[in-house]
Amino acid sequence: MTELGHFAAFLALAFALASGVSGLSGRREAAASFILGSCAAMSLAFLTLVYAFARSDFSVALVANHSHTLKPMIYKLAGTWGNHEGSMALWCLVMVGFGAAGAVRLRTGRAAFEARALGVQGLLAAGSLAYLLFASSPFTRLADPPLQGASLNPLLQDPALALHPPMLYLGYVGYSFVFALAAAGLIEGRIDRTWARSARNWAMAAFVPLTAGILLGSIWAYYELGWGGWWFWDPVENASLMPWLIGAALMHSLIVTEKRGSFAVWTALLAVLAFLFSILGAFLVRSGILTSVHAFAVDPTRGLVLLIGLLVYGGAALALFAWQAPRLKGGPPWQAISREGALMGNNLVFTVATATVLLGTLFPLIAEGFGRQMSVGEPYFQLTFTPIMLAALIALPLVQAWAWGRARLDGAWKWLAGLAVLTGLFWLLGIGPLDIPLGAGFGVALGLWLVASSLVELKRRAIRLERIFRLPARVWGMSLAHLGLGLFVIGAVVETSQRYETTLDLAIGEQAQVAGWSVSLEDMRLIEGPNWEAQRADLVISRGDSQVTLQPEKRFYPAARMPTTETAIHKTGTGDFYAALGDRRRVDGELRWTFRAYYNPMIDMLFAGVIVMTLGGLVAVAGRRRRKAVADETSKAAALPAE
Amino acid sequence: MRARSRRLWTFSIAAMVLIAAASLVVFAMRETADLFYTPERLAEDGLPEPGQRVKIGGFVEPGSLEYGRDALIRFSVVDDSPNRLAVAYRGVAPDLFREGSGVVATGSFDPEGHFEATQLLAKHDENYVPREIKHIEQPGT
């Protein structure tokens, strides 16, 4: 079976190369057929890997190293992409998948352009497939298969994490097709309104899963790692944030190019950068060049190949860009105070924010170049990233009603006054009953301000309230995205500024106080699961009349010889009481256990905000497809009488 | 606005934002960068300023690990030199933290020269070693 898969992957490589050659020489239908063939072959190859994992076929090296018969079936299947080689196979599958989707759905009426886009996608896929087959083959057989597998990292046996890589890869690799569209547009010297209309669909199709993938990873880290936080500014996390920020800038600059034809050069550059940052992300994660708290077995040679790929793709794209950018046409003139100006400001903020994240992430390498080992952590990002993004958040409600070309500033002062009054209100509340610092009060006011303004904008676009459901889906998408951003800001500010965290050191029967709760350790027990054994604590927490037993665990997976932490969370309605079991110690002849205990207020609001943003993107994607269908119907109907 | 003056305006705004951001980045890096030391490097360079956040990396010296009340952990960090550094940490140790394991401790020195860690990073996976201590030979292997 696996040999069949190996063969199919070679076939996929041949087809991808063929589609690259035929596409770049301008034959659309040939390129489409080849990339569809490549997708079919790669699907088969990937299925044989999944099948090997399902069957626990330990004669395949990948399965022997990353699976185990005692693992639940769902995690056996997810194990296919829970390792380097398998995840590269997934990467290739998604890439030819996007190519196949483009072969079917990319209809712009310009066959030469479509052919080139498919051709570039074919070449990108060929590069990835060559990397898969020659540098990290998942199809290797073992001459002497073991009787039992070496198991998957137990930390990864989690539903959120089984879905996290596929989502993230849909996003990362989705940008490969946006890259291909930009390259094809540049080859033709046409990055215009028609180009932007089709590119916007594909950029959205990458942005939505990327957002969802980052969200899943963050939720997983919160529940599974036991550190009480949701974002640690770790290199591996930043690696996914950078393409997201560039993707967000691209979403906004594409609007200008679609509606006005302006920003063509800039939009093309962002479209190229989004994918380059995706590869950079893969490189940072897989090469182990930076110290990360997240678990990856790394291999520097693989990193080198990825780096070469990054340089080749990046160099080729930027050379093409430099050559053709002067030929691109601009749109009608516009003033500083206009929608164009506002969206340019947005782009400036997002790209500068990306640059600060990039510098902070690569800082250890830069410092080492100067001969000293150093690193920056959360404080650096709070000093740079946060104030820069703050500028965009404050500006958003002011500028979102601005018209194309030239806008008026009236009404801006009302919004600013509203923000000031809200901040003052929270400040007053802060002095009184609630213990909120001014900065946090401002943050919450800002979040509320964003929520309110996105609703006001929705109403303004509808003119009358009863027409609100007849607004185009993309207006709804935008409003939901901005509303979700507001919810996220509220949650993030409250959680970050009001989080309470402490370490407990308890013997059985002892008690402690945490954020107004009294906590007592009633019992410790040993329990056994399907492929693990655990110490489980009975931690009784009470406040007023309510009393709950939390059961945090420390699990040990004998197959992986690895402990993991299972957190216990009590949702109070306004936040999470969160406990993680630490280590067992013998102090002065007495057995004691340590715990991490947190109170995380409004953490669900933060996750919910990102879910609403993702939904906004989904609404916009679904709406554009429907609108296109309606438009096709109308044009058919119009064509009929002429026959 | 004509195309040329628009371009001029665009570039000057962008340049201003970039300069502001660049100064912010430089300021933040100066304020928040954590220097990394091994016990050997500490012996050569002398102790950093008290209160300055630094990282100490190496291996947990076998036999040095001690537990105390209030979640206290004491251990010594060693590298392939004869130097060692005593570390005190209050909190939960990472899952794979044990005697002989690689560790990176973030914290600061007090005026008496005792190192107090606020965060411990141990290897997170059987195959993973934090990059800073990769070049140090593990004692006893």
Image (spheres, rainbow, N blue to C red):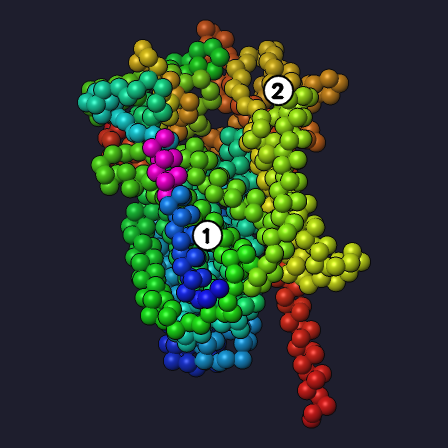
Picture quadrant of residue A321 = bottom left
Pointer 1 chain: A
Total numbered labels: 2
Classify mark 2: helix, strand or loop.
loop
Magenta span: chief secondary structure? helix
Could you tell me residue A426's position as x and y percent? 65, 30
Q: Which residue is mark 2?
A: A515
At x 47%, y 22%, the residue is: B92
In the image, residue A226 sits, relative to residue A595, either above or below, namely: below
At x 37%, y 22%, the residue is: B107
- Circles 2 and 1, Cβ within 8 Å, touching? The answer is no
At x 72%, y 90%, the residue is: A641
At x 49%, y 72%, the residue is: A192
Picture quadrant of residue B111 = top left
Q: Which residue is mark 1?
A: A348
Classify mark 1: helix, strand or loop.
helix
Q: In the picture provided, is A299 more to the left or to the right than A256?
A: left
Mark 2–mark 1 Cα distance, whole angstroms, equals 41 Å
Magenta run includes residue B26? yes
Eye-nearest disc, 2 or 1: 1
Magenta run includes residue A238? no
Q: In the rendered structure, which segment of residues is drawn in magenta?
A: B22-31
In front here: A626 or A333? A333
Q: Amino acid at mark 2?
A: Ala
Q: Amino acid at mark 1?
A: Leu
In the image, residue B11 sits, relative to residue A630, either above or below, namely: above
